[in-house]
Amino acid sequence: MKYAIVEISGRQFWVETGKYYDLNRIPTKLGQEIILNRVLLLNNEGELLVGKPYLDQVKIKGKVLEHLRGRKTIVYKMRPKKKTRKKQGHRQELTRVLIEDISIV
């Protein structure tokens, strides 16, 4: 089983080939290939490689499947005894990426 832990836009993801992940919006076109190079850890069939902080020789190829929006989150602010209430909704802009290959250069 080959997997990697990757840092993307300040968050860490455990990625495997053949699976898709929802990341923060990446400004690219649909169908375009992207390369993820901030690999923190790689497990290659039991052989564990740990970066300090990143592994420079490991590249992960992904393909942008679609751009979408996440579920709505309600933000409610209230000041007690002041009759001040503020209700907002937020939907995060996301990009769905299919991981195609994890390779050691």
Image (cartoon, rainbow, N blue to C red):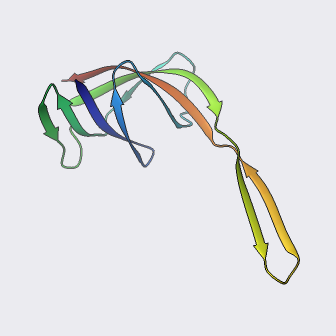
Q: Where is residue 3 drawn, in percent x and y?
A: 27, 29
Q: Residue at x 38, y 18 (%)?
A: 18
From what the image shows, is residue 79 above or below residue 104? below
Which corner quadrant holds the N terminus? top left
Q: Is residue 101 left or right of residue 69?
A: left
Of all residues, the one furthest to the bottom in this rendering is 81
Q: Where is residue 100 drawn, in percent x and y?
A: 37, 17
Q: Is residue 26 visible?
A: yes
Q: Please identify the quarter of the rendering in which residue 16 is found.
A: top left
Q: Please identify the quarter of the rendering in which residue 40 is found.
A: top left
Q: Where is residue 42 drawn, in percent x and y?
A: 21, 34
Question: Residue 43 or 64: which is nearer the viewer?
Answer: 43
Q: Residue at x 78, y 77 (%)?
A: 79
Q: Is residue 74 left or right of residue 18?
A: right
Q: Is residue 45 left or right of residue 72?
A: left
Q: Residue at x 57, y 19 (%)?
A: 30
From what the image shows, is residue 64 above or below residue 74? above
Q: Please identify the quarter of the rendering in which residue 17 is found.
A: top left
Q: Is residue 56 visible?
A: no
Of all residues, the one furthest to the left in this rendering is 47
